[in-house]
Image: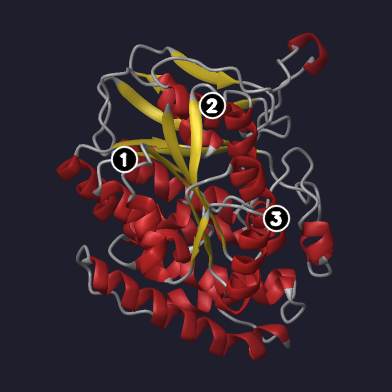
Amino acid sequence: MIGVAVLGSTGSIGESTLDVLRRHPGQFRPVALSAQRNAERLFAQCLEFRPECAWIGDAAQYAALAARLRNSGSSTRLCTGADALEQLATMPEADYVMAAIVGAAGLRSTLAAAAAGKRLLIANKEALVMAGRQVLQAAARSGATIIPIDSEHNAVFQCLPQSSALGSAPAGVRRIMLTASGGPFRNWSAEALQDVTPEQACAHPTWNMGRKISVDSATLMNKGLELIEAQLLFGLPVERIEVVIHPQSVVHSLVEYIDGSVLAQLGSPDMRTPIAQALAWPGRLASGVQFLDLLQVRKLEFEPPDLQRFPCLALAIAAARAGAEMPAVLSAANEVAVAAFLDGRLNFAGIHRVIGEVMNGWVSAGTEPELEAVLAADARARVLAASQLPAAAAGRSLAS
């Protein structure tokens, strides 16, 4: 029986992971679950899956949730605090760790799982954008196996030779093409984008995702973060990674080889496919996903991204080229700006203005930073981004 720790179990990736595990009770056992604040959902998951441990990030909810678990007869041990989350990622009972905590909050537990030699199913793109080099180095030292869960990177992973090592350029690969749906505003004018509401931004046309990643998809920042992630995971320069708009979300990414061959991974737009692939690798596992019917899809469309209407992607490309701590700065500023947009304190166009202002005013050290320097850059970028919110919300012209 394979023990699985699902970090971020109440989010969309966590719920999809548990759905796949639910289908294979004789093969997998959830041994740890975590949630930042959704105590009600975490309680229900604990009753169903009976993990050894559960973690709640919101300390104010700890006592009430612990009492509910005791009163229900649950043997699950509840904990809280940053150190306890890292302990969940390294507990001996957890053979696999699903890293699905959104944002920088998931970095330390992801690093801990990599250092502990786990099979790390990594869905937290921000952790790789911030400190991917450190994650890969920790995995190399411990012998951990890393399998990307983002549908695009998992697709590339499936299209590469099984002998390929993450972090190194695969032999014979000319370029990688990351597909993007284009989000809900693919055909909107720049003027119309000024008045986008959070509800509209979170209404993705093909994927069911959390609010933060849905906004990132709408701005194309999600694809920019994935480009930085691909650069790290597959050892290719930015110039050999291309973003292609593909509204059907059927082709999840493509790998072009130097002999002219192009391999692609296709499937229904459902995150249970990459999750099942990562759980079963190098084998295969039923995921519950609806099988792809190409006769029903009928056509597959591809087009280049519009960097003028969606400047967040251009900012991410610039951060990838700059390297050093700039990807961490980009990610941190984006988290602050997106949170402000979702709270109604910033308009949609203000997201890229805040990020651009932080990046334009940043003086880079120019060298690959160690972990503490990355965390310091993340913290400073958040302060700078927060300082830009009133001006951005008022519509002042900021550098983009």
Q: Is 29 or 162 nearer to us in this picture?
A: 29
Res 49 quadrant in image: top right
Residue 118, labelled with which disc? 1
256 sits to left or right of 101: left
Q: Residue at x 25, y 47 (%)?
A: 116
Local SS, label 3: helix
Local SS, label 1: loop
Up the image or down, 173 lies above or below 361; here it is above
Q: Residue at x 40, y 79 (%)?
A: 379
Q: How far, Cα to Cα, is label 2 from label 3?
A: 22 Å
Up the image or down, 93 lies above or below 289; here it is below
Circles 1 and 2, Cβ within 8 Å, touching? The answer is no
Would you name the residue on which mark 3 appears?
41
Q: How far, Cα to Cα, is label 1 from label 2?
A: 17 Å
What amino acid is at disc 3?
A: Arg
Would you name the residue on which mark 2 appears?
276
230 sits to left or right of 392: left
Which mark is first along the chain, 3 or 2? Answer: 3
Instruction: Give the x, y percent position of residue 393.
Output: 71, 84
Instruction: Give the x, y percent position of residue 97.
Output: 41, 43
Of marks 1 and 3, the one in the foreground: 3
> Can the viewer see residue 255 in this picture?
no
Q: Is 90 or 14 nearer to us in this picture?
A: 90
What amino acid is at disc 2?
A: Ala
Local SS, label 2: helix
What amino acid is at disc 1?
A: Lys
